[in-house]
Image (cartoon, rainbow, N blue to C red):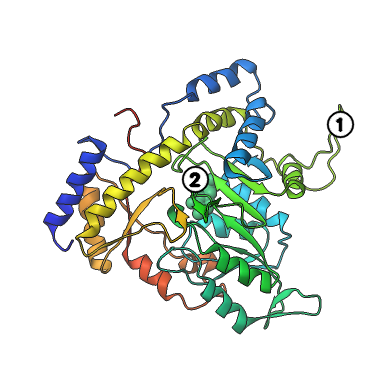
Amino acid sequence: MSNVSDISRLIEFVRDEYRTTDFIPLHAPKFEGNEQTYVADAIKSTFVSSVGSYVDKFEKNFAEYTGSPAAIAAVNGTAALHIALKLVGVEHNDLVITQPLTFVATCNAIAYCGAEPIFVDVCCETLGMSAAALENWLFENAELNNSNKCVEKISGRVVRACVPMHTFGHPVDIDGLLKVCKNWNISLVEDAAESLGSTYKGRHTGTFGVVGVFSFNGNKIITTGGGGMILSNMTLGARAKHLTTTAKIPHSFEYYHDEIGFNYRLPNLNAAMGCAQLEQINQFICTKRQLAMKYAEFFATSDLRFVTEPQDCRSNYWLNSVVCQDRVQRDEMLSTTNEQGVMTRPVWTLMNRLPMFKNCLRSDLPNAEFLEDRLVNLPSSVTSTVK
Ligand SMILES: *Cc1c(COP(=O)(O)O)cnc(C)c1O
């Protein structure tokens, strides 16, 4: 894929898949199920806000689908991450390890806790945090103190949690990361915002860490308009519900709140949409995986690497992506496709380059920098299920 005719072939291929000559977005939502019925029903019930049967139902169905003991709905994925970090005890002045290749929400949630991110490199195959990079950073920069807490050697600040992210739906090396976190007494929190429907060794992402977090923003695999979910055990689930509902002590009429809580509960209106979307998740994944296989075949004869699911994993292929030869080829691909109404995007600017995180601790980041220069996301919406 080194000349214009190859990119034209790609554009033709994408247009063929989506059967349109109109603008093709990166990821558009699909409402071909019970969305209208359930949302109308929520309005009719007058329970449109944070109390209502759809919120409970959405949580129950989500826990069942992912195989998690508890699932607590939140207003968005960022709020869910914020609560997840509080659940594992992240406090003011703590350090939290994450990856530089992620959406800014991961780092913002860390900052909301008054903590600071540390960036360790990703793995080129999974696009997620590298267990070796994590281990190396800790070996060189951290130690276990008298009370068996992991602290950064120079500042003495506690390294409380580690937040890997399942990039574009591809699961990270969970076993490798869990092992390092266990050795260093660090809590693992999965940013599974992009990986609903993705499994690692047959088990759903978001259920391996102490807490796992999902997002239902408009561009995710299922959407509630805005929304998020927190997965955990029953004890932490109860605590998550308390924190997301203003920390109110249940009582038939008294208002009593026992700590500073948050107004983070997902409204019933949004949950109604979520229930309808979740009913279609298997269908969505099926058409997305079919599209990914076609992309893989298309790129097999090119000099670009199409990113496929890691070993022992099943990916939801939320966003399809290719790794270009270099930044020049990437830029050519981005400008040509976007000019012609086929939306493609580069990967996020690395977190360590953003002004608010530029002074944070980090390892060398050769893989993240390599991918930053070369990665391109391709149109990935669910193709119509009514073909
Ligand atoms: C979408 C996303 C989130 C959460 O986003 P919200 O818009 O707040 O729901 C968090 N992390 C990652 C990696 C995401 O892609």
Image quarter where the C terminus lies is: top left
> Taking 268 as reference, is 145 left or right?
right
Q: What residue appears at the point 54 percent right and 54 percent down from the top-left corner? A: 105
Residue 251 marker: 1
Q: Position of residue 29 (x, y in %)?
A: 41, 36
> In the picture, residue 159 is in which quadrant?
bottom right
> In the picture, residue 56 is in which quadrant?
top right
Rendered view: 41 above or below 184 = above
Crowding at mark 2 (Cα within 10 Å: few <14, some 14-19, many 20+) = many
| Residue on which disc 2 sits | 197
Q: What residue appears at the point 61 percent right and 33 percent down from the top-left corner? A: 58
Rendered view: 137 above or below 160 = below
> Taking 136 as reference, is 168 left or right?
left
- Give the mark nearest the N terminus, 1 or 2: 2
> Taking 7 as reference, is 28 left or right?
right
Q: What residue appears at the point 33 percent right and 37 percent down from the top-left corner? A: 383
> Taking 46 as reference, is 173 left or right?
left
Q: Determine if residue 266 is in view.
A: no
Crowding at mark 1 (Cα within 10 Å: few <14, some 14-19, many 20+) = few
Q: Position of residue 239 (x, y in %)?
A: 76, 47
Image quarter where the N terminus lies is: bottom left
